[in-house]
Image (tube, rainbow, N blue to C red):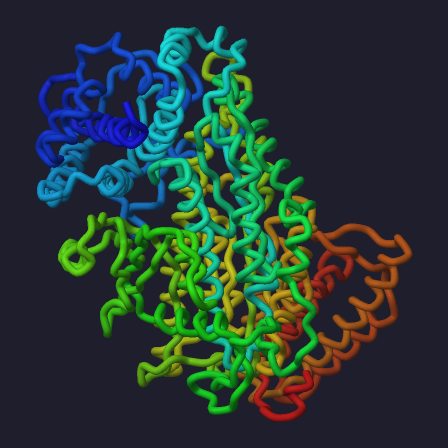
Amino acid sequence: MDKHTAALATLLLGIGKIARRAGIGSGDFRALARSFGEQVLPTDINRRLAPALSPTNDGESTWQMLRLAGELAAGKSLEEEPDKPSRLQTILSRLGDETRIPASMPIVPLTLSQAAIFAQEGSSTEDAASAYSDLWQALSNDAQRLTNAEGDLPTLISDIYYLLAQYGSNIPAGTGPDMEDVSLFDYSRVAAALACCLSDLEAPTVARLAVTSDQDRADDNTTVALLLEGEISGIQKFIYTITSRGATSALRGRSFYLQLLTDAVARFILRTFDLPSTNLIYAGGGHFYLLLPANAVQSLDALQSKLDRLFLHFHGGDLYCALGAASLTCADFASDRFGSAWRRAGMAVSDRKRRKFAELGNELFSVLGTGGDETRECQVCHYEGDDVEESQRDETDTATVRKCELCRSLEELGRDLRGASAILLADTDAIPSEGRTYSAILRSLGLSVAIRRSASGWTDLPNNAQRAVVLGIQGMADDAIVATVQRQMHCPVARGFRWTVNISPLRSDGSRATFEDMQQASQGLKRLGVLRMDVDNLGTLFSEGIQRRDQKSGATVPAATLSRVAGLSSALSRFFEGWVGVLCKDVNERTRANTGLEAVYSIYSGGDDLFIVGAWSVLPELAQQIRSDFGVYTSGHPTLTISGGITLHGGKEPLYQAAESAGDALEAAKDLDGKDALTLFGQTLYWKDFPEVKRLQNELERYVEESEGNRSLLHILLDAYAQYRTTEKELREQGIGRTWGGAQQVIWGPYMWRTLYLLRRLADRPQTAREEIERLIDELRKEDFAGLLWLGLAARWTEALTRKSVGEDEERD
């Protein structure tokens, strides 16, 4: 059986399991999968699928191959078990050795809603049967659109893949303890990828491995697949080498281009080895993981050389794609060994990054050139070439700067993304293209892209595509839109979805808000804020932390199967690529209602991290909401935490400096023991302390309002806080002090007594809120004056929120 047929058969088996749990007929799930295929797929395709989906062919080599793929995906041999209606125990609640109430997913189609992506405590199977019946009915109705599908296997695989993603992501792969925390979708796509790899092996080898016990497989050194990791480096510099002024469209375009570039490289590699989309295990944040046939290892150096030439030609060495692989035997898929295989692939990538462009040898120098001509230098990215020309700085700024062709095209991409509802990815011939636009670069990798803008339809649709997929960015793409595209492009088109945080702020008149607008929308101090967050210890979690408690022994055992790793990736992506966008949209709706201007701009959110720019005053509570919802999303798992950093910047500050400052703030938060922290106004605190600081900030703000703008209290607290931080720094450098609340607690000093004296004098003044000040004095004296740490931060926060002056002094702040 060829690779594509094997992948399609495996995905259909997943649909057969849904049918069986819904009580459709009484047959084996293979028979139900075959029946489903006969209803919606072309006759010739069903003929090719028959050997794999016939329940009478248990000893047939094709079925043995698919069964072996399923066992490797599960990490162990599978025993027949009653496929009863059951709920998915979310992997986010079962990681590690913590004993907690399990959390289960609702048995509903996957949609971008809290009701569909957040787990619920408990594992009740009440009403599960009727929920499966409803799920099957919705799936069956949705699948009817396939009855007119053309017989293009890669397109059919994509259609069934996204169908299973929508209806199989919230239900378990099996009912036993080894499979109840893996979604049917993630298990099926991994099994399909493995089936593709196994189909490249000799039939006798597959037959031998299929009937071998787990113990015997552990001693077998046959390589059955290759885990390939790819990483695009240089992302930070590429995105942030632009100034804040007039950079709104360019920034979003650059960020999204890197996502497209990651996709393009991954898809290019899949086409190189004639593999379907199922073999892409994960792509995001400049990383991707592919499952390739074992013999692909022989082609990796040549593949690396191709990518080196392309990246060097178009990006001059600013971006680099490193490939690294780990060969996998059957034993490597076991839960106690897969983490090691994952690390091996990562180490191979690290080794490749240390030898950037080494495959090119002397070619490297002929491509780089000499440089030195300022008139041919792009003032945005510093590329030097003949395509640099004077261009308008931004659509809202008539001043001109020199821009290269790539920078101009990325600005256009950013503008196209505003209000986008769908993205089209089309496979084309990978032919070097004229020019240096983002679309030319992607076409050199065999990918053409079009964006559907709600108001004006599609950007240019490619006219030479072999096949395409339309992806809705908030949900499944509309059938009518897909049908229209298929007629216009004259090629098979699949339908799917990819959640994307695409939040671009608008003014009240519907025009685009600039960085200057967002800065002016800040309450109090007019500053632009930058928020960066990411999940703590994620690399370690993937390679070492996926564990579960053995039901028989009670011991904690490794559980990092490929299906679980894929499931963890999917779960994190749904939060960062989906739910973060919902929270950002909520903030914009509130600020627009209050000020007539939206205040949050999502630069990137995906994988396990995010980068958001906006009015600084809304970012602390947005960050806290993200962290709070992440805690709920992970069912309060103590090892799944998220840290963040927020910094404030003037509108004229280069964006790369702002990005670096926010990155430093994030790193400061991640340097705290246990992490799960935030850095705000240069002070790092654990998230558990944030509500207390916010409470104090609210009290101080209320005091300023009630005292008609009297800021004497703030000045006293800020002066004490500044002296505290200075003394803290001096003592830390000397190695003196003790830990308190994650920070160095300084020894007592005269400024403490002076602060108390000034506060009591302030309390004795007429028309002063004496009780409030006395209460703050009590707060200040908590834990040997440690209360100053949070009171000082709250005062700094309040001072910025209540500042009224606008002008030169503020710009120097």
When the figure is inspected, residue 309 is found, relative to residue 294, above or below; the finding is below
Left or right of 281: which side holds 138? left
Residue at 27% of width from left, 40% of height from top?
154
Left or right of 212: which side holds 386? right
- Residue 226 in the image: x percent, y percent? 49, 29
In this rendered view, identify the residue nearer to me: 69 or 439: 439
Residue 727 sits in which quadrant?
Answer: bottom right
In this rendered view, identify the residue nearer to me: 374 or 158: 374
When the figure is inspected, residue 575 is found, relative to residue 785, above or below; the finding is above
Residue 755 sits in which quadrant?
Answer: bottom right
Q: Which part of the image, by quadrant, shows the C terminus?
A: bottom right
Residue at 29% of width from left, 68% of height from top?
459
Left or right of 669: which side holds 154? left
- Residue 43 in the image: x percent, y percent? 10, 31
Q: Does residue 523 appear in this view?
A: no
- Residue 526 in the image: x percent, y percent? 56, 83
- Residue 629 in the image: x percent, y percent? 44, 52
In this rendered view, identify the residue nearer to me: 511 or 364: 364
Q: How many marks?
A: 0
Residue at 58% of width from left, 91% of height from top?
806
Q: Does residue 517 appear in this view?
A: yes
In this rendered view, identify the residue nearer to me: 765 or 740: 740
Q: Which part of the image, by quadrant, shows the N terminus?
A: top left
Residue at 45% of width from left, 68% of height from top?
435
